[in-house]
Amino acid sequence: MHLRTILNRFQRHPGFIYGTERWKDIEGREVVVIPLRPRARSKPICSGCDKEAPGYDTLKERLFQFVPFWGVLVFFAYAMRRVNCPTCGIRVEKVPWGDGKKRTTNAYCWFIGHWAKLLSWQEVARQFHTSWGTVWRCIEHAVEWGRANMSLEGITAIGIDEISRSKGHKYITLVYQIAGKQKRLLWVADERTEESLRGFFDWLTPDRSKIIEFVCSDMWRPYLNVIREKASHAVQVLDRFHIMTHFSKAIDEVRANEARALAEQGKGHVMKHSRWLVLMRPENLTEKQSCRLQDLLQMNLKTIKAYLLKEQFNLLWEYSSPYWAGRFLKSWTFRAMRSKIDPIKKVAKMIRRHEKLILNPLQHQRRSQPWP
């Protein structure tokens, strides 16, 4: 079976004919080149308006990389025509196997994009004898297609988060759809400023923003400001993970300070290898770690006091009544402020400032689950 037969079966392009494949040496590697030519009396399509237009001239032959066969690189060879479009002027024709000036076919972009989900981009480039930049452009092609064909209907719940993209406190803002079975990334923007998030709501349009019922975010002030401005009608929920992250940071700070103080007194062994004992959930500890934690709980340490306050706060997630959950929060913050542990007092002040948002899921539990 000829290669042309396979292509005519699975990659037929109306208006174009595959020629006879040939071998060609490119940068010391033997590759297969498959020529393409337009059918007789077929008119080229203007790349500007997607309409047929009279031909103007023909450019030099160009290679378009196609999906490899049996580890052998495959290229399409085609001399692009220019058209004299009455609307757009002189333009290069539109071809069905590629976009714009890209030197890769759409089929190749999707092929590489599939493998990029399974392997690192560098490994994909190595396995298929291409460059990291080509892999990146293939991913860009898939993302652009997805954005252009994305349905924005029925978005009723969104989650807002930020992640660090490099050292030096450089972040990107992410917005997800989190309603029901459809969970997907909707928006990515540089930095974590008000402008970063406001761009999402401008892109979503005010009409679609009005149907958002729930917004889940952390306590980053710029995000809260934009949510109040653009989605004040929605139920705002603080993410439990981000709340507990503040506890972990506070406990780690207390532990580190206390470990240094004990080391100066010659008692460094007391807190040795104790970091993950107080940061992990008790049910995730090994048997040996649980025994070690029980020994620490018998000691009068600030780290243990902070740890116990964190575990007491976790009882909040068991409440289903907003009234009793509010009573619990007031009682807990009172104890935390009297603990004389500065990092924990800082967390307690933060809890007080955002008490209303923390209790929001219970206030609106008829429309949502009790806790995010």
Image (tube, grey):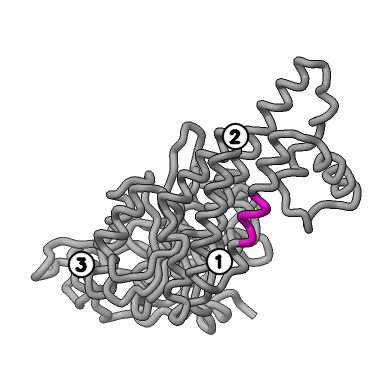
Q: Nearer the viewer, residue 85 or 81?
A: 85
Report crowding for label 1: few under 14, some 14 to 19, many 20 or more residues within 10 A (C-alpha). Answer: some
Q: Which residues are magenta?
A: 310-315
Is disc 3 placed on a helix, strand or loop? Answer: loop
* Picture layout, residue 318 above or below residue 312: below
- Label 3 with label 2: CB-CB less than 8 Å: no
Q: Nearer the viewer, residue 117 or 17?
A: 117
Amino acid carrying mark 3 in the image: Gly
Q: Quadrant of the N terminus?
A: bottom right
Give the quadrant of residue 207.
bottom left
Amino acid carrying mark 1 in the image: Phe
Q: Is residue 141 visible?
A: no
Q: Seen in the image, is 220 located left or right of residue 112? A: left
Q: Which mark is residue 190?
A: none
What residue does disc 1 label? 111
Q: Position of residue 231 (x, y in %)?
A: 29, 66
What residue does disc 2 label? 341
Q: Main secondary structure of the magenta part?
A: helix
